[in-house]
Amino acid sequence: MLVRIGHSADPDDAFMVWALASGRVDRRGFDFELVPEDIQVLNEWALEGRLEVTALSLATYPLVQDRYALLPHGASIGSGYGPIVVAREPLSPAELRAAEIVVPGRLTTAFLVLGMALGAPFAHRPLPFDRILEEVKSGRADAGLLIHEGQLTYADEGLAKVLDLGEWWLLETGLPLPLGVNVARRDVPRLDELSTVLRDSITAGLDHREEAVAYALDFARDLERDDADRFIDMYVNELTCDYGDEGRQAVEELLRRAEATGAYERPVRVDFVS
C-alpha cells in the first residue's frame, strides 16, 4: 500500500524520515512517498485529508481530529525553548502588543501560543516562514515570529530576541511546549504496524546520526552542519521517540487552554494511535 508522508521541509523532520528514504528500515509491506512542504501548507492539506500521514501543527489537530489520529511519536517538543519573536531592537511587552507581527501562518502552534502570551487578538500579517527574517530586518514589519532554523540565525541578521514562547510556556505551566505532531489518517489499514515503521525510522536516524544528518542537510537551507545538527538535537529527542506522560500532559494542557479561549468550535478530543 502506498502511504504518502508529508513532512516539514526542515532538518529535524528530514532527519526523522532518513531511514525511509534510504531503505534502512523494515517497511512491513508499505510503500512510502515522502512529501516535503511548508508546515502551513501541510496544515491546509490536512483540512482536506489529502495525505495518509502528515506532520501537522498541534494547533491544527482539533480541526482534523475526526479524520486523523495522533501518532505516539514524531513530535517536535521544546523544553524551555521554542518559537521566538524578534525585532530590530528590544521591545517592552506593551510595545510588542502594539506592534504588527509577521507570523508563519494562522494554523501554526506558534501563532496560537503567541496569542495566549500577548492576549489575542493582536496585530499580525501571515508570511511564509522563510521570508520573516528579511521582512523584519528591512523594516517592513515591526517584529516577526520565527519557527524552524530562524530560531538559530536571527542574531546573525542583527535582530534581537523579544520573546521566547518556549520559555514563556515553561514558566506558565512547568511543561515542555509541543509544536509539531505527526498524524495518520484513520482510514489507513494496519495503523498499528504503520506506526511501528515510522517509530523505527526515528530510532534508526538516532542510531545512525551522521548519515541521517547528512541527508537532513539538504533541507537546512543556509545552516552550517553544526547548526543543523544543533537544531535537530533541539527537536529530535526522547519526547520525539515517545511522548511519555509529560509529553501527553503538555499536549492536553495546550489544547485545553486553547479551547478555553474559544479557539475551536467543537470539543477537542486527544486521540493517539495505539
Image (tube, rainbow, N blue to C red):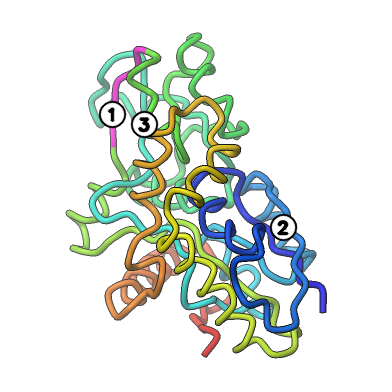
Mark positioned earlier in the residue sequence (3 or 2): 2
The secondary structure type at the circle numbered 3 is: helix
Q: Would residue 230 be found to the left or right of residue 100 on screen?
A: left
Q: Amino acid at mark 1?
A: Val
Residue at 71%, 54% in the rendered image: 44
Task: Determine which residue is flagged by label 2.
Answer: 34
Q: Amino acid at mark 2?
A: Leu
Q: Amino acid at mark 3?
A: Leu
Task: Determine which residue is flagged by label 3.
Answer: 152
Separation (CA) of disc 1 from disc 3: 14 Å
Q: Would residue 51 be found to the left or right of residue 133 on screen?
A: right
Task: Determine which residue is flagged by label 1.
Answer: 162
From which residue to which does the magenta span run? Answer: 158-163
Badge 1 density bin: few <14, some 14–19, many ≥20, Cα 10 Å: many
Residue at 44%, 48% in the rendered image: 210
Magenta part, dominant SS: strand
Query: Circles 1 and 3: CB distance less than 8 Å?
Result: no
Of circles 3 and 2, which is in front?
2
Q: Would residue 39 be found to the left or right of residue 88 on screen?
A: right
